[in-house]
């Protein structure tokens, strides 16, 4: 299983679509998260061009900051749930080979001071919830 996270600093730039498509293909990624896409929406044709076997979800940009695009290969994973937060895109997936279920959370915070405390509190809460779930299974 191979995944990547990339702060792309905008997907509206010329040549960027081909660049991320090559990145996903060349690295044979099973999941990917792109931060700072600076896009408010994605057309199906755009997402299918990046990878037609991926299940995609995105968080819209706020002004010129933010936005997250996350994709998981449906040939490798059953996507059980998506959750959009103010600063995050999370997915719960089940590996098709071994049925192992796990949660993947991509977080992106504004480079501005506004919202920093709220973002830090979210990260703290998410890490505590994850630790509690693991502790209960041990």
Image (spheres, rainbow, N blue to C red):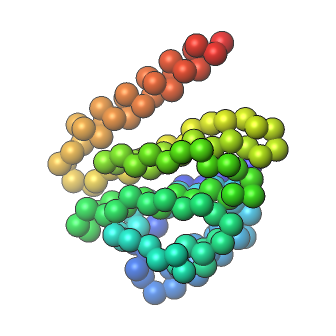
In-image side of 27 versus 44 (left or right): right
Q: Nearer the viewer, residue 120 or 84?
A: 84
- x and y, in percent, of residue 52 in the image: 66, 72
Q: Nearer the viewer, residue 27 or 46?
A: 46
Question: From the image, which quarter does the C terminus lie in?
Answer: top right
- x and y, in percent, of residue 92 in the image: 57, 41
Q: Is residue 9 visible?
A: no
In-image side of 74 versus 110 (left or right): right
- x and y, in percent, of residue 24 in the image: 65, 67
Against 121, residue 19 (above or below) is: below
Against 98, residue 75 (above or below) is: below
* Residue at x-position 70% and y-position 70%: 25
* Residue 22, quarter of the rendered image: bottom right
Q: Residue furthest bottom?
A: 14
Q: Residue furthest front?
A: 80
* Residue 118, quarter of the rendered image: top left
* Residue at x-position 36% and y-position 46%: 85
């Amino acid at each position: 299983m191979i995944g990547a996270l990339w702060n792309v600093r905008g997907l509206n730039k010329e040549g960027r679509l081909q660049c991320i498509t090559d990145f996903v293909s060349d690295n044979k990624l099973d999941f990917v998260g792109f931060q700072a896409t600076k896009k408010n929406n994605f057309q199906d044709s755009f997402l299918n061009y990046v990878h037609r076997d991926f299940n995609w979800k995105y968080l819209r940009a706020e002004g010129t900051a933010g936005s997250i695009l996350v994709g998981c290969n449906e040939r490798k994973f059953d996507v059980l749930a998506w959750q959009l937060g103010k600063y995050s895109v999370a997915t719960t997936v089940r590996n098709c080979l071994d049925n192992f279920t796990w949660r993947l959370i991509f977080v992106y915070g504004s480079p501005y001071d506004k919202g920093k405390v709220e973002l830090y509190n979210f990260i703290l809460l998410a890490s505590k919830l994850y630790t509690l779930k693991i502790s209960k299974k041990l």
